[in-house]
Image (cartoon, rainbow, N blue to C red):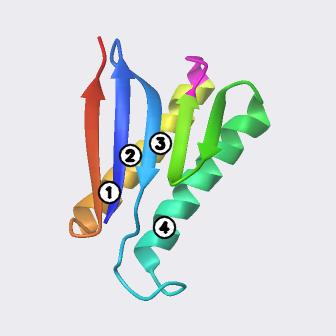
Amino acid sequence: MIKVKLTKKGGIIKNITVKGHALYDDFGKDIVCAAVSSTIITSVNASLLIDENSLSYEENSGLDIEVLKEDEVTTKIINNMISNLLELEKAYPENIQIKEENNE
């Protein structure tokens, strides 16, 4: 299962952690993994293309994204990414799980 953890502060997403595999199908044929990867990579690349200081990311045993700016464009891109991931979670609840954590 792909596990996505959203960490918010003051109601604003500050960190996104993505770990695991969907296990919907064999590696290389997994449409859930492909959809999640495509959504996240496109969003990160779009944000960095517009403002290279908008976020940072690190790949280790998964992907850790830190949102560095709270401007309108970055917020819209991140919110759109989360919206797409939530739709995938609805369609494939056995393969992707999203949890929110508030650090107030």
Which residue does the numbered mark 3 point to in the structure image?
80
Disc 3/disc 4 C-alpha distance (Å) = 14 Å
Quick one: SS at disc 1? helix
Which residue does the numbered mark 1 point to in the structure image?
87
Which residue does the numbered mark 4 point to in the structure image?
35
| Magenta-colored stretch includes residue 88 | no
Quarter of the view holding residue 96:
bottom left
| 4 horizontally vs 46: left or right | left
Q: Which mark is residue 61?
A: none
Residue 101: image x %, image y %? Answer: 27, 29
Residue 37: image x %, image y %? Answer: 54, 62
**Residue at the image position 35 percent from the left and 78 percent from the top:** 23
Disc 1/disc 3 C-alpha distance (Å) = 11 Å
Kind of residue sitting beneath label 3: Asn
**Residue at the image position 77 percent from the left and 30 percent from the top:** 52
Kind of residue sitting beneath label 2: Ser
